[in-house]
Amino acid sequence: MLLVLGFGLGVGQPMTMSWLAESAPAGLRGRAMSLRLAGNRTGQILIPGAAGLVAAGAGAAGVLLITALGLGWAGVAARRLPVDS
């Protein structure tokens, strides 16, 4: 079970990197990759801290609500991405 879960979770990072390399213009691929990495690192720092602050004030239900709102926002933002025909 752990092997399957690890593979499933680990395949996302290389897939998004290859998607980004394909979708970025040829002269801006390095910039796109660095912005993605900076966004990931910022999220790894800010999101756990924010979740801790929410949990301190609203408990576990507050963290779950914030998580649901974040997933909803990501879904709305993903719908705005251009679709290749």
Image (spheres, rainbow, N blue to C red):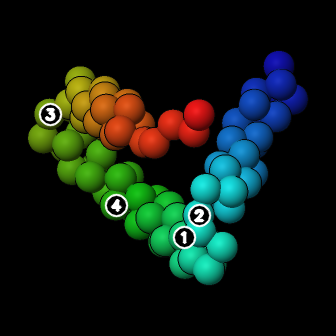
Looking at the figure, which quarter contains the N terminus? top right
Q: Residues within 10 Å of mark 4 (few under 14, many from 20)?
A: few
Disc ID at residue 24: 2
- Residue 8's place in the image compared with 40, above or below, is above
Furthest toward the left, the residue is 57
3D distance between C-alphas at marks 4 and 3: 18 Å
Q: Position of residue 59 (x, y in %)?
A: 21, 31
Callout in the foreground (3, 2): 2
Residue at x 66% of width, y 73% of height: 26
Helix, strand or loop at mark 4 = helix
Residue at x 69% of width, y 57% of height: 22
Looking at the figure, which quarter contains the C terminus? top right
Q: Mark 4 or mark 2: which comes first in sequence? A: 2
**Kind of residue at disc 2:** Ala
Q: Quadrant of residue 25?
A: bottom right
**Kind of residue at disc 3:** Ala
Q: Residues within 10 Å of mark 2 (few under 14, many from 20)?
A: some
3D distance between C-alphas at marks 3 and 2: 41 Å
Return the residue at label 1: 32
Disc ID at residue 46: 4
